[in-house]
Image (cartoon, grey):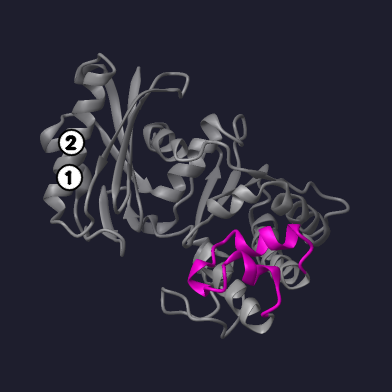
Amino acid sequence: MYNIGIDLGGTNIATGIIDENCKIIAQTSVKTNAKRPFDEIIADMVTSVKEVVNEAGLSLSDINSIGIGSPGTIDSQNGIIVYTNNIEINNVPITSKIKEEINIPVYISNDANCAALGEVYAGAAKGKSNAVMITLGTGVGGGIIIDGKIYEGTKSAGGEIGHTILIVDGWECTCGRRGCVEAYASATGLIRQTKEAIQANPNSIMNDLIEGNLENTSGRTAFDAARKGDAAAQKVVDTYIKYVGEILVDITNIFRPEILIVGGGVANEGEYLLKPLNEYVQKFSYGSKYIFVPKVERATMGNDAGIIGAAMLYASKN
């Protein structure tokens, strides 16, 4: 039995076939343009499915299901992309559109949900039934897995961990609220904090790393300088870890999952990020001296998590 997963992005459509062991046996990638009409994007998805089936030496009759991971708010029950600001597909019944071209069951969920599901089936949370994943990238995504299934809330609109409040009346978020987790804990938020620290500390090693040009600041700048012993950079890192730590403590207190998974570009800092996060969660989670506290682990599947999770949506939905 084979299943197909599609990771739909604003510039790229990644499609893969997985076998019964959740191994990707064939994969293809199609460049796309998020500003094109939705029917052209759907045509690209259909083409990518047919291409990957041919690459694997299979036929469509060998495929059990197709799953799609998409950014934005998804009505997974009705197969509709309700809203996404990354791709101009809004209120489109995408699963039925694809089924018009390929008569195979089609499922869809938010891309962060799919990434979390992929980690449960084949990555850092393999063998676990309850897990929560946050992705620290341009924004902050969240995926909640309960009893092996994606938790999406009513109308599939829940699980927006990045748009919970971290600091009341804080920085403005892209969603319009102030003080959201995403404004502070995303790579974008980290870069903002780093730039402010560089401007306040012109003699910092961070200024050398960016060659005096703030536009060169990245999510790695403060971490790289902190490793070199720079005090201003270490303060940025410590504050950022506190922000992320608070999110993980809240998640622990609400869900008490078996594992907490951190993905996204910032997670590439490895133990320099994970060790203090584990210490923070252990210290501040409710009843931590007496009750199980989940370990914080780095996501291991990379971009493959979205494909594998999307391909396994049929199992999560049934």
In the rendered image, residue 310, in percent from the top left (x then y), is placed at 38, 38
Is residue 41 toward the left or the right of residue 133 in the image? left
* Residue at 45 percent of width and 50 percent of height: 112
Q: Residue furthest right?
A: 289
In the rendered image, residue 205, in percent from the top left (x then y), is placed at 69, 68
Residue 84 visible to the viewer:
yes
In the rendered image, residue 300, in percent from the top left (x then y), is placed at 57, 37
* Residue at 54 percent of width and 67 percent of height: 217
Quarter occupied by the N terminus: top left
**Secondary element at tag 2:** helix
Asked whether residue 254 is drawn in magenta, I would say no
**Up/down of 300 relative to 204, above or below:** above
Q: Tag 2: Cα neighbours inside 10 Å, few (<14), some, or many (≥20)?
A: some
Q: Which residues are magenta?
A: 202-230
Answer whether labels 2 and 1 touch (C-beta < 8 Å).
yes
* Residue at 77 percent of width and 55 percent of height: 276
- Residue type at tag 2: Val
Figure disc tally? 2
* Residue at 53 percent of width and 29 percent of height: 122
Residue pointed to by mark 2: 46
- Residue type at tag 1: Ile
Mark number displayed over residue 224:
none
Residue pointed to by mark 1: 42
**Nearest the eye: 3 or 228:** 228
Quarter occupied by the C terminus: top left
- Which image quarter: residue 127? top right
- Which image quarter: residue 194? bottom right
Is residue 121 toward the left or the right of residue 204 in the image? left
